[in-house]
Amino acid sequence: MRIGLMTDAYYPQIGGVSTSTSLLKRGLNRQGHHSIIVTTTDPEQPDNEEDIFRVVSTPFFSAKRMTLAFHPILERKIEEMGLDLVHTQTEFGIGNFGRLIAKKNDLPHVHTFHTLYEDWLNDQLHAKRGGLGQRLVHWYVRKESRRFCNAAHVVIVPTEKTRRILRTYGVDVPIRVIPTGIDLYRFYEAKDNIEARRNLRQQYGVGDDDRLLLYVGRISQEKQIEKLTVYIEKRMSRWPQIHFILVGDGPAAGKVKNIIEESPHKDRIHFIGPVRMENVPQYYAAADLFLSASQSETQGLTYFEALASGVPLLVQEDTCLDGVLNEENGISFHDETSFDLGLATLLTETDEKRSLRSRASVKKAHEYGLTSFVNKVLAVYEEAFILKASRR
């Protein structure tokens, strides 16, 4: 099968959409299919990419890129390839380009809805909570999400939470819940590299008996990263053995750096910034706990990456964690008091209990392997072929 994966966000951009699309391409190719990616240009893009077609784009909010949906030269080139199916990953320029390609060439169209844009767009526009701007954002996001999703034959979402939200938007096409898979072996391999783990910890002054707390993801308001940093910073005087590493970038980076700079414990809070995708597993492997205060996730791919690395979770309560977080692999919190209790519990556990949590984390992550993910997506592709034929 020849599949066109259409996305406005792709490597070297860091994020769930980029990671998911890259993994899907790799998994489809492993199973003998031919997948191409159509995406935007990026100043940091690598040379000599295979089966990746980029169109000229301009910077948009944060690190995102923006382009038009009209690309006649590329359109002809894609039509000559004879695609069998279009799978869009975003709802903007390239997503709309993919939708038009599918419609013009009478192809099945599958769409994956990755992002709940209401929180993200309010963050970018600094919309006042409850104000006119926020209400307009909500109206626009719901209208455009409904329009785009209903143009597809089938929509994929990563969690039941997202499926329920799309139904409230008025999306009435079939919606299939498929958690994004992860390439487990990248994280298993890093976890087993004891020397690399020790070297990375030493690089940031983290001793063998210290506890390294990790956040990986966008540094943005909707991720509540400032709140999380403050929570940890306030407890560093009580827990002199903890260090905190933040991996990622985003619009709240300046505010987080200010919190760190003003802290008397700034030598134990390490803002790393963006890290190349192939190096991310090393940071998980070096950590003892993974932390997040986000409630804007459609799935939370970083949670699975942490679990695959044997790293237990201390994360904000969220319905996206249903079936993922359990009493064996981590603890959730809902406010500062419960965060404090969860952190104290995880920091004071015996070595035997910590080892049990690590093994339980890896066991849970195994449910989200790449092969299972790709097989479920292929089943949706077959459903899209059937639905397209039935609409004639």
Image: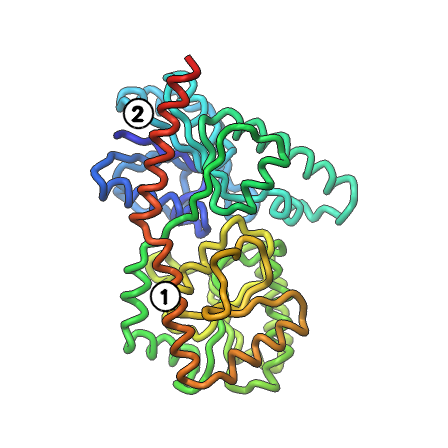
Most foreground residue, 373 or 84: 373
- Per the image, label 2 sits on a secondary structure element best described as loop
**Labels 1 and 2 touching (C-beta < 8 A):** no
Residue at left offset 32%, top offset 24%: 78
Residue at left offset 41%, top offset 24%: 71
Pinpoint residue 18: horizontal percent, then vertical percent: 41, 46
Q: Residue 340, located in which quarter of the rendered image?
A: bottom right
Residue 238 marker: none
Most foreground residue, 158 or 10: 158
Residue 84 marker: 2
Above or below residue 144? Residue 270 is: below
For the image shown, how many numbered marks are present on the structure?
Answer: 2
- Per the image, label 1 sits on a secondary structure element best described as helix
Callout 1, which amino acid?
Answer: Val
Give the crowd class for mark 1: few <14, some 14-19, many >=20 residues within 10 Å: many
First along the sequence among labels 1 and 2: 2
Alpha carbons under labels 1 and 2: distance apart: 36 Å
Image coloring type: rainbow
Pinpoint residue 134: horizontal percent, then vertical percent: 72, 42
Callout 2, which amino acid?
Answer: Asp
